[in-house]
């Protein structure tokens, strides 16, 4: 599993990186480690024009490619929201895959 945190328009801090990694663990727990490659990219972006932060989380696995993003004034809150959003997306994608596989097995 490859995991990368990218900082745009801002500096990396140990506290922010630890917070991001802790929240990415929620996503990692839902993934099947046997199915590789798995690539997780978290992009933390500080807008120069306004005081909003944009957080984008992308996930690429053999089964699906998912992207979740959120924008707002608090970076830590946006990381929390985007990881929760990705957890919902993964669960939804897994349900779709299960229903497709069940449909094939019914024949």
Image: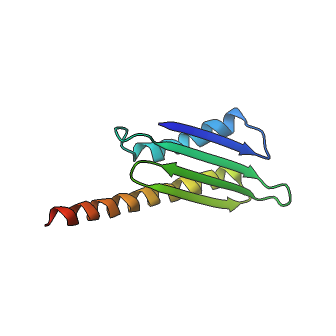
Colouring mode (rainbow / by chain / secondary structure / one colour): rainbow
Q: Residue at x 68, y 36 (%)?
A: 15
Instruction: Name the one closer to the observer, 5 or 85.
Output: 5
Count of labels shown? Answer: 0
Position of residue 20 relative to residue 47, above or below, is: above
The residue lying at 81 percent from left, 58 percent from top is 51
Q: Residue 100 falls in which quadrant of the image?
A: bottom left
Would you say 34 lies left or right of 17 here? left
Q: Give the position of the C terminus as an image quadrant.
A: bottom left
Q: Residue at x 51, y 43 (%)?
A: 39
Q: Is residue 38 above or below residue 78?
A: above
> Residue 89 appears at what percent x and percent y?
46, 60
Relative depth, front residue between 31 and 61: 61
Q: Is residue 21 left or right of residue 14?
A: left
Give percent across and percent down for residue 90.
Answer: 43, 56
Identity of the residue furthest to the top in this view: 14
Q: Quadrant of residue 54?
A: bottom right
Identity of the residue drawn at 47% across and 47% down = 27
Q: Nearer the viewer, residue 90 or 80?
A: 90
Q: Where does the image place residue 87, in percent across and percent down from the top left? A: 46, 55
Residue lying furthest right in this view? 49
């Amino acid at each position: 599993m490859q995991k990368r945190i990218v900082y745009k328009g801002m500096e990396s801090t140990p506290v922010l990186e630890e917070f991001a990694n802790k929240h990415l663990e929620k996503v990692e727990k839902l993934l099947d480690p046997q199915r590789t490659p798995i690539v997780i990219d978290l992009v933390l972006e500080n807008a120069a024009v306004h005081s909003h932060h944009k957080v984008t989380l992308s996930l690429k696995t053999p089964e699906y490619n998912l992207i979740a993003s959120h924008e707002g004034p608090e970076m830590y809150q946006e990381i929390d929201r985007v990881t929760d959003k990705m957890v919902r997306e993964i669960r939804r994608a897994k349900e779709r895959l299960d229903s497709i596989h069940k449909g094939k097995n019914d024949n």
